Image (cartoon, grey):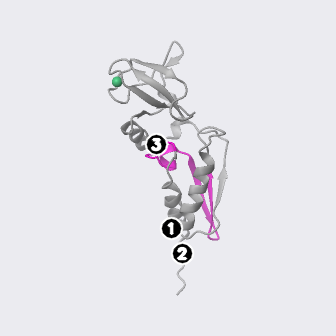
Amino acid sequence: MVALQDKSDLRQRAWNAAASVVDPEIPVLTIADLGVLREVAVNDGHVEVAITPTYSGCPAMNMIALEIELALEREGFRKPKVRTVLSPAWTTDWMSEEGRQKLKAYGVAPPEPASSRRALFGVQQIKCPQCGSENTELLSEFGSTSCKALWRCRSCREPFDYFKCH
Ligand SMILES: [Zn+2]
């Protein structure tokens, strides 16, 4: 029996498979949460996925591309293609609200949307993900991974990571 596959169904299946891939550095976030997954197209049964790295040269991207291919192959798509799109550049505004909440629950301060970013003497103030205090200080530009900076809260004294890729 040959069933005529609805094209939008196929695209949805491909999207769901690609969207299930998580960021290797922050495993609670999917690439859909991050806004890294830009586009999924299905033509004649061939899937092409477009991704935009959080910053150019992000070391996690090769791994993410490979994971997408594997996820699509598991769904039965053969020889999926993953394309990296550098323009327009990724911005933190592409991160979903759900993604921000997940980050916070993970103990990492989510990036402030560019539109509501507040700066004090040219230094961005980051809210503590633990207690919400804005009385925080930057300890190191480099946290546990290249995508995070290490901050400390002066109110609850806890150090925390800030997701800083932009
Ligand atoms: Zn705190």
Q: Which mark is residue 5?
A: 2
Alpha carbons under labels 3 and 1: distance apart? 23 Å
Q: Are marks 2 and 1 in contact (CB under 8 Å)?
A: yes
Alpha carbons under labels 2 and 1: distance apart? 7 Å
Q: Label 3 belongs to which residue?
A: 96
Quarter of the render that holds ligand 1: top left
Dot 3 surroundings within 10 Å: few (below 14), some, or many (20 or more)?
Answer: some
Specify the quadrant that holds the C terminus.
top right
Judging from the image, what secondary structure is the residue with disc 3 in?
Answer: loop
Name which residue lies at 54% across and 75% down.
5
Q: Nearer the viewer, residue 111 or 143?
A: 143
Bounds of the magenta segment: 25-50
Q: Which mark is residue 63?
A: none
Q: Is residue 62 left or right of residue 15?
A: right
Alpha carbons under labels 3 and 2: distance apart? 30 Å
Q: Looking at the picture, how far across and down is residue 47, in whole percent?
A: 62, 63
**Mark 2 within 8 Å of ligand 1, using the beta carbon:** no
